[in-house]
Amino acid sequence: MRFSKLAMVGLVTLSVNQLAYADAVEIDAMSLLNQYNLITSGNVISTSEIDGNALIGGNVTGGMYNMHSTSNAVVPSLTVGGDLNGTVQTKGKGVNIGGNVSGSLNINDGGDAYMNSVSGWVQNNANGNGSTSVIGDISGSVNTNGGNTIYGGTNTGFAGANGSGTVINQPVSAPFDPAAAAANAVNTLGQFSNQLAGTDFNSNYTITGGKVTFNATPNTDGLAVFNINDGQSFFESVNEFAFNLGSATSILFNVFDDALSEYDISVNFLANSAVDLADMLLWNFVDADSLHITAQFGGSILALGTDVTTYGNIEGTLVARSLNQNAEIHSQPSGFIPPSAVPVPAAAFLFAPALLGFLGLRRRANLQKAA
């Protein structure tokens, strides 16, 4: 049995305050892939945009979040376990920053915003549907348009509230711990990745020149499973993907290597399949240490122990160790249905019910292939 790199991560124990909520909300692995467009355990550096919500365990530098979301998510548009730097813009409702805001944060579309401290600049356009809460000190500038600005520490900078809002100095706390939420989600998805990696393959592919044709022979549940061994050399030697789906409704790619590997991925998904099949495809990179994606890539990606750099758009949700983002990540809500033998672990007590108020509302099998 081969385990993905995060399979041995222990369960996260959340704080007493979080567990004190009697009806804490459980979100399982597939729900996580649909509630979020990006999940990382580490840092994100971005010069581009993410369609949907982001859950980031480390620091954030730059980027635009929840810019074109089509999901009915019940999570904040941006959740950050660490600090926020650079220029960041959000749409959708809700922001929760566990550390300090030292860059500039422009919040649109309303919703409540929480952050630990502010030494930079925060503008929350709440417009009557939210407020800005700073748990600690303000040494920079915080302004809420159409809502209250609340801080629990000392204000040596600027705190403002336009419209009907007021500035209030009183103790304040976030509805959940962003770092713990990210760690728990990563743990859940690490278990899920490992379980998927043990699923027997039932489908094969052919390679002609640099063109790969995936020939799906799904099980009775509509699931086709492909194993790609020696993943690094595979991706280095191919340049086109084509799909014969048959009756498949979900496709799982388990990608393995004998050692931690660097993947350079520049593949043309033929016939617009990167977009058209995105909701069916789930890529499980078990051993990748780094991914460099330089062309449009179709499907959601589990790469939990992996540093990802993008120069091509991703059509689906990305789960990674860290991200250096130079192209868009598009929200493609997953219709993937896991193998019935694979229990979908729940991210127990990921969020507290106060969130509603916050928002306002791998055994390795031998690969058989024909060349």
Image (cartoon, helix red, strand yellow):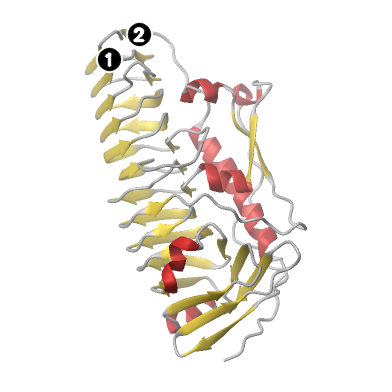
Quadrant in the rendering for residue 228: bottom right
Q: CA distance from mark 2 to mark 1?
A: 9 Å
**Which of the labelled discs sits on residue 169, or is there none?**
2
Q: Disc 1 designates what residue? A: 155
Relative to 337, residue 87 above or below: above
- Residue at 57%, 85% (x, y): give it: 206
Relative to 271, residue 53 above or below: above
User: Is 25 on the left-hand or right-hand side of 173?
Assistant: right
Query: Badge 2: how crowded within 10 Å, few (<14), some, or many (20+)?
Result: some
- Residue at 47%, 25% (x, y): give it: 359
User: Is 237 on the left-hand or right-hand side of 220?
Assistant: left
In the image, 221 versus 118, the foreground residue is 221
| x and y percentages locating residue 143 in the rendered image | 25, 20
Relative to 246, residue 65 above or below: above
Residue 362 visible in this rendered orientation of the protein: no
Work out which quarter of the rendered image holds the C terminus and state it. bottom right
Work out which quarter of the rendered image holds the N terminus and state it. bottom right
